[in-house]
Amino acid sequence: MHRRNLLKGTFTAAGALLAAATSALRANAADPEKSKVVYHLTDLDKVGFVLGNIRNHFDGVGGPDKVTIALVVHGPALKAFHAAPANAEVARRLGELSKTTLALHACGNTMKSQSITLKDLPPGFVVAEEGGVVRIAELQAAGYVYLRP
């Protein structure tokens, strides 16, 4: 009888601890102020789609003050952001997003291969000197969730 009560008490305590831990995890996951996301963009044909996803992400969590979003651009997609040939739709969407906390990273390797400098890109971009994929890995190590639409 004593063992049964001890075992029952142990399971009850373990259940309570599990419930508390689950509740704490849910609270942290539901706290959008803790959200950090990195969007990976390399496909030229997905530029508009990804910018739309980022806008929807900000809207979905209640605004830019609720989430930290970084956009890392490399490969062919960076051509959409060149100041001279940038299309009007990309420029408009980027202009809207410039009012948010979106961090824009351009791959330094891609910039070299496309023979562009930071002044050739819209304001707000910073150079990922070690490369776009390295920057993505750094952000993931810092707790950012990786999204590649």
Image (spheres, rainbow, N blue to C red):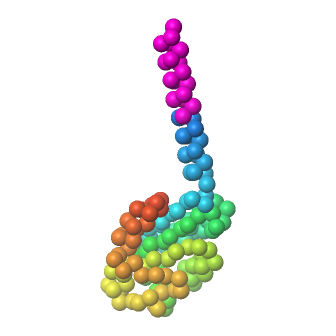
Q: Residue at x 51, y 63 (%)?
A: 37
Q: Position of residue 119 (x, y in %)?
A: 46, 91
Residue found at the very far top of the displayed protein: 1
Judge left or right: residue 101 versus residue 116.
Answer: right
Q: Position of residue 91 (x, y in %)?
A: 57, 83
Closest to the observer: 37 or 31? 31
Q: Quadrant of residue 128?
A: bottom left
Q: Residue at x 52, y 86 (%)?
A: 122
Q: Is residue 134 magenta?
A: no
Residue found at the very far front of the displayed protein: 2
All told, the count of numbered labels is 0
Q: Is residue 56 above or below residue 116?
A: above
Q: Is residue 29 above or below residue 115?
A: above
Q: Main secondary structure of the magenta part?
A: helix
Closest to the observer: 80 or 29? 29
Q: Residue at x 43, y 75 (%)?
A: 73
Q: Quadrant of residue 51?
A: bottom right
Please state the extent of the stretch shown in magenta in the rendering.
1-17
Q: Residue at x 56, y 73 (%)?
A: 102
Judge left or right: residue 122 versus residue 97.
Answer: left
Q: Is residue 78 visible?
A: no
Residue found at the very far right of the displayed protein: 62
